[in-house]
Amino acid sequence: MKIKNQFAIFIVLMIIWFLINNSFKLEVIAVGFVLSFVIAIIFGKRTDVLNEFKFTPTAFFYTLIYLLVFFWELIKSNIQVALIVLKPSLPINPGIVKTRTILKSKMARMILTNSITLTPGTLTVDIEKDILYIHWINVESLDIDVATEKIVKKFENILVKIYG
């Protein structure tokens, strides 16, 4: 599994390198290749979350769907938070809610919690077994099932198809 981890880290780092540099010059590619390779060799053997990284057509397809859903939720929540900032008289009810996840995979849980945290208005505070504690800018319900449905399910339904 060490080589799979190293390969996954290498690919992710190369993609990030291309996005940051926005150049396909030979020297830029060479520097990115060397840096990505060295970092992947050093950290690949110590990283176990990437053991579950899937390189299948199904995983690729659902990853694209996940990105679309994530960006849609990102846009919606940005608008909601912007309205709160622009019109402070809007009622908000901040608080920490308990949600549940059915995901067992470390990778899927990492993606889920990061997606929740990256979406404005929510922040993953803690994880205990299958319970996620999330700070929600406008708590709509303290009921665990309602909060799970509103915050977690939209991401979880796709991640379960990728990571089982």
Image (tube, rainbow, N blue to C red):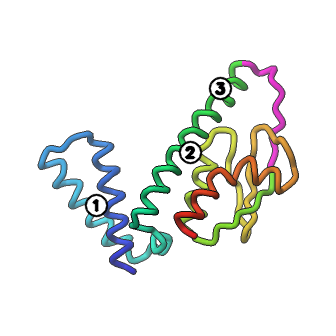
Q: Disc 3 on helix, strand or loop? A: helix
x then y, percent, for residue 107: 53, 66
Rendered residue at 51%/44% (across/down)? 68
Q: Which residue is mark 1?
A: 36
Q: Is residue 149 magenta?
A: no
Q: Quadrant of the C terminus?
A: bottom right
Image depth: mark 1 or mark 3 in front: 3
Q: Nearer the viewer, mark 3 or mark 2?
A: 2
Q: Residue at x 61, y 40 (%)?
A: 73
Say which mark, if any, is on residue 82: 3
Q: Of the residues shown, which amino acid type is indicated by label 1? A: Ser
CA gap, disc 3 to disc 2? 20 Å
Is residue 30 shown left or right of residue 134?
Answer: left
Q: Is residue 118 left or right of residue 121?
A: left
- Kind of residue sitting beneath label 2: Val
Q: Residues within 10 Å of mark 2 (few under 14, many from 20)?
A: some
Callout 2: helix, strand or loop? helix
Dot 3, crowdedness within 10 Å: few (<14), some or many (≥20)?
A: few
- Vertical placement of residue 147 versus 130, above or below: above
Front-lying residue, 27 or 3: 3
Residue bearing the label numbered 2: 69
- The percent position of residue 147, horizontal first and vertical second, equals 79, 50
Q: Position of residue 157 (x, y in %)?
A: 63, 57
Snapshot quadrant of residue 43: bottom left
| Left-right relation of 15 to 122 | left
- Could you tell which of marks 1 and 3 lies nearer the N-terminus? 1
Residue 78 higher or lower than 143, as above or below: above
Q: Main secondary structure of the magenta part?
A: loop
Name the element at disc 1. Answer: helix
- Residue range (magenta): 87-96
